[in-house]
Amino acid sequence: MPFAYLDDLTLLEVQRTAINLGFADEGQLDALNAGIPPAFVAVAMQGGNAQAKLMTLTARMNATRVLMSGEVPLTRWLHNAILLAGGVPEEMVFRKALERASVDGSAPPASTAEGAAESDQDLDVAALPAGPGGLEIVIEEDDTLDVGFLHEGSAASRSVAKLLVHRHFNGTPSMLAGNRPDLGKGTGWMLAPRLLVTNHHVVNARIPRLEPPASPQDFELQGRSILVQFDFHKASSVIAATRSVACVANDRTLDFALLRLPDDAPDRPPLRLRPTPITKPQERALQERVNVLQHPNGDPMRLGFRNNFVVIGTEDKLSYLTDTAGGSSGSPICDDAWFVAALHRGWLTIPDGPVKVWGKEISQENYGTPVGQILQHLAANHPDLRAEIDAGQAALGDT
């Protein structure tokens, strides 16, 4: 499937709205394209009139993951469209598209050159360990796997679920046109019997930089009514569904949240937790790999396992090159034995990048919170939940 940030219907709505607002005028096109490398615009924007130019450019941007400069052209364009819309109702079309287009529902950090305030994610980028040299790969060993890898991965997938979070504002459920619920998307997985883990920002269900965090009341309401869908592997899948009854623990810094499932929820075993972190200094050649079971864009489950090299592995952070997309937040980051090493949370720009992998320059990497950090936090703040998780892991035995 070709890469695309937005599905066809969403892209068409963005294009139609921009044209209706007069953004296809030559002068407005220049403003929309501000900050996007002119060379890219010159190649991508084709057509005999301004409307055709807008449509060809947005279509090309939708299929362009990232430029060599590290710029994501579609998200830059959508930010510009939001500013030009200037508070008219149609502005929400661009805001919704930006939420979907951004990896894991998180817009790229704004450049400090534009006067943007430093954010938590900006600090994460600065804190990521950096070292000299590239990441050229020299593999001098057999990297095939026992076929049991497939069977065990299939079993693990049964404990991973798509999450749909009904957004609330001031205690009221948010609805879209046609009386459709306003839903945030994510992924979660079983950490213990009746305990599912995902990201804090999945439960929060707000657009970073564009919306304030959910109030404690709204966060609680959202956390106790999340639709949890197991077995969504293809469009025709028979889904085993349930709803959370409470968010029993969360931490914004570590970006995790624990959801309690009801007693009649589908019986799914917890995933095994890796007892030690994956260790990978940046200066060492790429070798370690991870595997990500995820629901990108709320679609049927996909497995990210190609070019899935670990870039940095420490007790505090795990970063990797596995592909993800919006809706992948909360996915388990597994080693080749399907032990969970980390909770996927987002992406970062690689410091001193781009780096080279298989001859290609890559400017961004995904990252997650190591499970050891989450367990330590629970031991200090929720010892009963930590004991529940330990008991669930012990019950798995050696099977």
Image (cartoon, grey):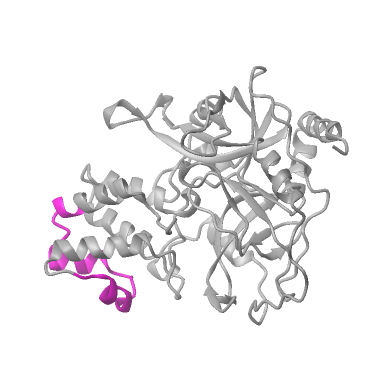
Query: The C terminus is located in which quarter?
Result: top right
- In magenta segment, residue 231: no
> Which is more toward the observer, 341 or 245?
341
Query: The N terminus is located in which quarter?
Result: bottom left
> Which is more toward the observer, 362 or 151?
151
Q: Is residue 270 above or below residue 79?
A: above
Specify the farthest residue to the top: 264
Q: Quadrant of residue 28?
A: bottom left
Name the residue at 32% across, 57% down.
Answer: 78
Q: Is residue 71 above or below residue 203?
A: below
Specify the farthest residue to the bottom: 133
Q: Quadrant of residue 75?
A: bottom left
Q: Is residue 135 above or below residue 392?
A: below
Question: Magenta segment, which residues?
Answer: 18-46
The mark total stands at: 0
Q: Is residue 186 left or right of residue 96?
A: right
Q: Is residue 287 above or below residue 38?
A: above
Q: Is residue 49 left or right of residue 43?
A: left
Q: Position of residue 227 (x, y in %)?
A: 52, 28
Q: Position of residue 245 (x, y in %)?
A: 59, 22
Q: Position of residue 71 (x, y in %)?
A: 42, 69
Q: Is residue 175 left or right of residue 104?
A: left
Name the residue at 14% across, 50% down.
Answer: 20
> Which is more toward the observer, 357 or 85?
357
Name the residue at 77% across, 69% down.
Answer: 142
Q: Position of residue 186 (x, y in %)?
A: 53, 41
- In magenta segment, residue 28: yes
